Amino acid sequence: MDPAPAPANPDDENAENKPRLNFVEQIIEKDLAEGKNDGRVHTRFPPEPNGYLHIGHAKSICLNFGLAKKYNGRCNLRFDDTNPTKEDVEYVHSIQNDIRWLGFEWDELHYASDRFEQLFQYAERLVMEGKAYVDSQSAEELQANRGTINQAGTDSPFRERSIEDNLDLFRRMKAGEFIDGEHVLRAKIDMAHPNMLMRDPLMYRIRHATHHRTGDDWCIYPMYDWAHGQCDSLEGITHSVCTLEFETHRILYDWFIQQLGIHASHQYEFARLNLDYMVMSKRKFLELVEGNFVTGWDDPRMPTIGGLRRRGYTPESIRAFCERIGVAKFNSTVEMMWLEQAAREHLNKVTPRIMGVLDPVKLIVDNYSEDGEPDLLDAVNNPEDESYGKRQVQFSKELYIEREDFMEDAPKRYHRLAPGREVRLRYAYFVTCTHCVKDSDGNIIEVHCKYDPETRGGNATDGRKVKGTIHWVSVDHAVDVEVRLYDRLFSVENPNEAPEGGDWKDNLNPDSLTIVAAAKIEPEIANGEPGTKYQLERTGYFCLDADSTAEKLLLNRTVGLRDSWAKLQEPRGGQPKRKKGGK
């Protein structure tokens, strides 16, 4: 949960009306009041270009760019591209596209690789000051000599090499004279330090690999902990905001800056975003993609920004979700329903309505006589916004309705269509069911009814009321659309925990995707471009898929009108429920 808000100034009569500050905002406002950093606020978003961004990154993006905007500051985009074997320009481009799609623009664009020469010179300085040394142990020896949480590490036999030898070896490492793993550069701190990250941490390793920007210019690459703080300093970052797993790294972040005597950026940690029914690990995402458990990084079931965009989520809904869950100091798990609810709230305002039938059965209006042209009825495009106007829908003798909207032997509280019962057809007329027709196997293939022409538009001139309203489409005018009903990718709240004797992937939901090959949709759907969003009335919010064409329309379900997974009543404002602990 968030920390308590800063105490209000008793002299400020409007204090109670001020929005609550998260703990990072409290720090910034205190710094500004004290004149720190020359009154500047400069943040950064520093992804490694080794994969696609996900909803957890969206929280960090909203926080860092949001802080800069709120305090008239600046926010950089910096790619921490220090591991050439896992990074690619494809990820660089996708990250930039995702940030812009979310509605943000960076003030400065940087790459850690821009600083390789400066970082090397900084490292040389520490070597010359006796604060770093070249270690020639194998990877296995390095690991064995680290010690444990309860046992001090063992000094390297190379720890006392002379400054001259260390400098010579380090420069030869850079020149490419050694093979991968033959040497590393380590900071000389304390092998008995209680924080194991301070036990002579690695600064450089040899890696003969082509970098996506620097090519083969370098064969030694800086470790994250060495590069990150110095890049923050060189960019003039004032508030280096990162997720909670880097809290133990802060002491090392500060140590390097102090030893170099450079601009002191300050690191602050917030809780990363964890969602129930979802994993939030690039490694696990990669397993899902490479194992063909999903169709790719932008599979609409994935929590990647690309997946959410393809599914039909809007930038506004993701930003609203990130604002609603807030910024906390302690790890917790947020219920998926809050992300879905944010989508509903925004899509309700901005999507046009159309009617579509996913499991069709024919409804025959026996007393309706078609005279040439179909009956055109006015339908509201969005009751939340009059500017969307109206459209005309075609009414005919033969219609499609949802199979579940008819029941031959209906209970008393069933308010849809049944023999002898009257319902309203949305925007059209009152109809009363007379009978149904079945095939030889007993399956209902037609429902027959009579309509009341005095109820055009859905209201009776005699004032009578009906309890049920159902949607429909005209058989002669409906368009066949492949509809993909996406649900949660995992069927358990914490899919990171593998079932006994199994694998975490055993938690995948076998019903996460259901394909309706030929749903019947209003002809209006044919006018949409890929990415166009709709509300199918009484069904949910949908988006035309990126691969949709005029010849084959593909519609993805973004989210249903209601939360089918909720154990309790659907959320109505307030704060999301958090589950303490865990990842």
Image: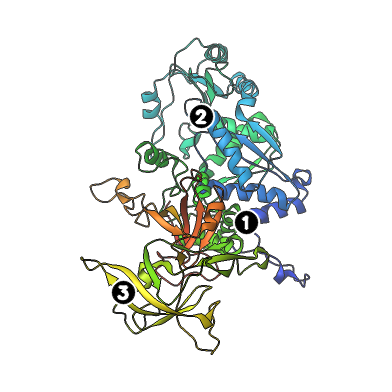
Helix, strand or loop for disc 3: strand
Mark 3 is on which residue type? Cys
**Relative vertical location of residue 165 with respect to residue 498 in this rendering, above or below:** above
Q: CA distance from mark 1 to mark 2?
A: 33 Å
Q: CA distance from mark 2 to mark 3?
A: 62 Å
| Residue holding disc 2 | 87
Question: Is residue 351 toward the left or the right of residue 443 in the image?
Answer: right
Mark 2 is on which residue type? Glu
Mark 2 or mark 3: which comes first in sequence? 2
Q: Residue at x 68, y 38 (%)?
A: 264
Mark 1 is on which residue type? Phe
| Residue holding disc 1 | 23
> Dot 1: few (<14), some (14–19), or many (≥20) neighbours within 10 Å?
some
Is disc 1 in contact with disc 3, using a CB cutoff of under 8 Å?
Answer: no
Q: Nearer the viewer, mark 1 or mark 2?
A: 2
> Which of the labelled discs sits on residue 436, or is there none?
3
> Dot 3: few (<14), some (14–19), or many (≥20) neighbours within 10 Å?
some
Helix, strand or loop for disc 2: loop
Mark 1 or mark 2: which comes first in sequence? 1
Helix, strand or loop for disc 1: helix
**Residue 46 appearing in the image:** no
Q: Nearer the viewer, mark 1 or mark 3?
A: 3
> Dot 2: few (<14), some (14–19), or many (≥20) neighbours within 10 Å?
some
